[in-house]
Image (spheres, rainbow, N blue to C red):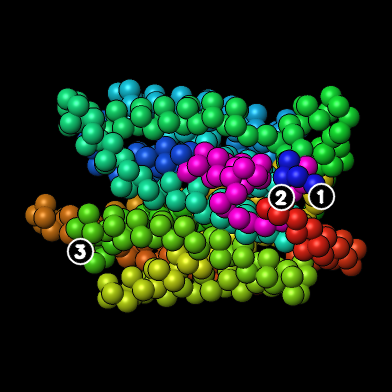
């Protein structure tokens, strides 16, 4: 009987923190949470930032675009680095270096400085890729989809928890004597310090694989398979299935990011909700990450057990189509209660689609799992970038038309017309995006696995179920 430090976990027992895989799961999920908490930590304070820095609407939109742009490049790079140096060192350096622009955001004095910090802060979005690589190295075939989805979902939760957490931090620093107008700056500095501290924790309390770190295993000659037989980045980019998953993740995670970033204003403009009410609705959207991604990975594993790798792809395609239908339907609803119901269904399906995507990723090519995770993960941010640009241009065009139509009227009439135009533009954008997502779900069926791939996966699955020793939990 092997102990927990010599094999991947075959059970997803989160209580067994003495197990290396489970301990790693908790630490990597917390690190991911803090990265997203810091990445989107400025969102609750954007009205204050716009006022203090004198930002134009265009500069505000640019900050949204830049925040996801930096992540595209970092995700592409970090996957290859994980294959070479291991997730432990990659996460340590990402947390330590990524904390710097977060902290510097608290000191910006001009819109240009703020935009640069948002671009650089976006690099910590690569944390998602490292988390997926690390859990893939720690968990066996029968539970890897569930583990990947849960760690990703709980990490993504940080992007919603900051709606509650950052104002609490602001209230604390105000209570300690800071000026209310400076609270957003201190809050971001605190978020950066938390990321830096987590980098230190990651270095000392995790390891690359259940057997040990890449470097130590290389010195003893006991190199893990993923390290010894790794294939190059070029091999990954030549596989058409990687690019289908790239597009799929662009259409689920990318769209979630965009909807999350624009939903506050949309709810206020469309349904005349108060800012706090709209923020709470968006928070409930984000809180579904606690279980929704896990469901996607769980059903991916279940379909994989009953129908093989093809089953994982079929479920992914199905849930993508559901996601697109929910968003398209939401875009045309004018009743808040009905709209809220469809928004929840969209949130559930989009996060399940994300989990289902990474229940397929580990089986594309186990020898280049870091590179593939990086490419697919980058797809999410490319999707967010393109969707944000679409909504930006539609909103700008509608706003110009509204201003022209209300020329000579009072300021209140102009503001009202602009809000209505912005709502209509985003509604049309959501409808178009929903239709694109449905199409992407159908395209996902193009992912194919060879008979050999199916046989290997089935053998690994059977081995996972056979290996039920308690110490492997």
- Taking the spot 87% from the left edge, 40% from the top edge, the residue there is 229
Q: Which residues are magenta?
A: 6-33
Residue 274 x %, y %? 19, 58
Front label number (3 vs 1): 1
Q: Is residue 54 left or right of residue 386?
A: left
Residue 271 x %, y %? 24, 67
Q: What distance separates the C-alpha of mark 2 from that of mark 3?
A: 56 Å
Residue 115 visible, this angle: no
Q: Neighbour class for label 2 at 10 Å: few (<14), some, many (≥20)?
A: some
Relative height, residue 145 to residue 78 (above, below) = below
Q: Which element is circle 3 on?
A: loop
- Quickly name the residue at label 2: 471
Residue 276 x %, y %? 22, 54
Residue 148 visible, this angle: yes
Q: Neighbour class for label 3 at 10 Å: few (<14), some, many (≥20)?
A: few
Q: Assess whether residue 18 is covered by the magenta stretch.
A: yes
Say which of 182 and 434 sits in front.
182
Q: Assess whether residue 115 is covered by the magenta stretch.
A: no
- Taking the spot 86% from the left edge, 37% from the top edge, the residue there is 228
Q: Earlier in the sequence, mark 3 or mark 1?
A: 1
Say which of 328 and 339 sits in front.
339
Q: Which element is circle 1 on?
A: loop
**Quarter assignment of residue 64:** top left
Q: Which mark is residue 1?
A: 1
The reply to whether the C-beta atoms of the residues labelled 2 and 1 are less than 8 Å apart is yes
Say which of 267 and 370 sits in front.
370
- Quickly name the residue at label 3: 272
Residue 68 x %, y %? 49, 43
- Taking the spot 58% from the left edge, 65% from the top edge, the residue there is 296
Q: What distance separates the C-alpha of mark 3 from that of mark 1?
A: 63 Å
């Amino acid at each position: 009987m092997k102990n927990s430090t010599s094999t991947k976990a075959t059970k997803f027992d989160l209580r067994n923190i003495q197990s290396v895989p489970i301990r790693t799961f908790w630490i990597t999920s917390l690190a991911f949470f803090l990265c997203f908490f810091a990445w989107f930590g400025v969102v609750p304070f954007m009205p204050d930032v716009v006022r203090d820095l004198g930002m134009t609407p265009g500069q505000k939109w640019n900050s949204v675009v830049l925040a996801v742009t930096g992540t595209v490049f970092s995700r592409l790079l970090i996957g290859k680095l994980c294959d070479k140096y291991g997730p432990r060192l990659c996460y340590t350096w990402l947390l330590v270096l990524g904390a710097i622009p977060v902290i510097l955001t608290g000191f910006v004095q001009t819109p240009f400085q703020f935009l640069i910090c948002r671009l650089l802060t976006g690099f910590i979005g690569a944390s998602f890729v490292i988390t997926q690589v690390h859990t893939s190295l720690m968990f066996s075939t029968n539970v890897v989809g569930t583990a990947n989805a849960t760690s990703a979902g709980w990490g993504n939760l940080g992007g919603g928890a900051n709606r509650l957490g950052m104002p609490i931090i602001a209230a604390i620093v105000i209570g300690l004597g800071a000026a209310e107008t400076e609270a957003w700056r201190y809050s971001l500095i605190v978020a950066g310090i938390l990321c830096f501290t987590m980098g230190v924790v990651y270095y000392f309390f995790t390891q690359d694989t259940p057997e040990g770190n890449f470097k130590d295993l290389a010195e003893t000659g006991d190199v893990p398979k993923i390290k010894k037989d790794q294939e190059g980045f070029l091999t990954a980019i030549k596989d058409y299935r990687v690019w289908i998953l790239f597009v799929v993740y662009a259409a689920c995670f990318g769209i979630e990011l965009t909807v999350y970033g624009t939903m506050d204003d949309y709810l206020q403009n469309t349904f005349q909700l108060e800012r706090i009410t709209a923020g709470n609705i968006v928070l409930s959207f984000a809180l579904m990450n606690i279980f929704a991604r896990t469901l996607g990975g769980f059903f991916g594993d279940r379909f994989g057990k009953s129908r093989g790798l093809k089953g994982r792809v079929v479920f992914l395609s199905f849930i993508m189509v559901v996601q697109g239908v929910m968003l398209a339907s939401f875009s045309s609803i004018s009743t808040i209660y009905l709209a809220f119901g469809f928004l929840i269904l969209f949130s559930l399906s989009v996060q399940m689609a994300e989990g289902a995507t990474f229940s397929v990723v580990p089986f594309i090519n186990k020898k280049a799992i870091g590179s593939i995770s990086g490419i697919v993960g980058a797809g999410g941010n490319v999707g967010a970038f393109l969707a944000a640009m679409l909504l930006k241009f539609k909103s700008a065009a509608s706003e110009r038309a509204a201003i022209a139509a209300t020329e000579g009227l009072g300021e209140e009439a102009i503001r009202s017309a602009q809000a209505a135009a912005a709502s209509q533009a985003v509604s049309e954008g959501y409808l178009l995006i929903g239709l694109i997502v449905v199409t992407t779900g159908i395209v996902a069926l193009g992912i194919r696995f060879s008979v050999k791939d199916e046989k290997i996966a089935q053998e690994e699955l059977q081995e996972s179920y056979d290996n039920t020793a308690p110490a492997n939990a």
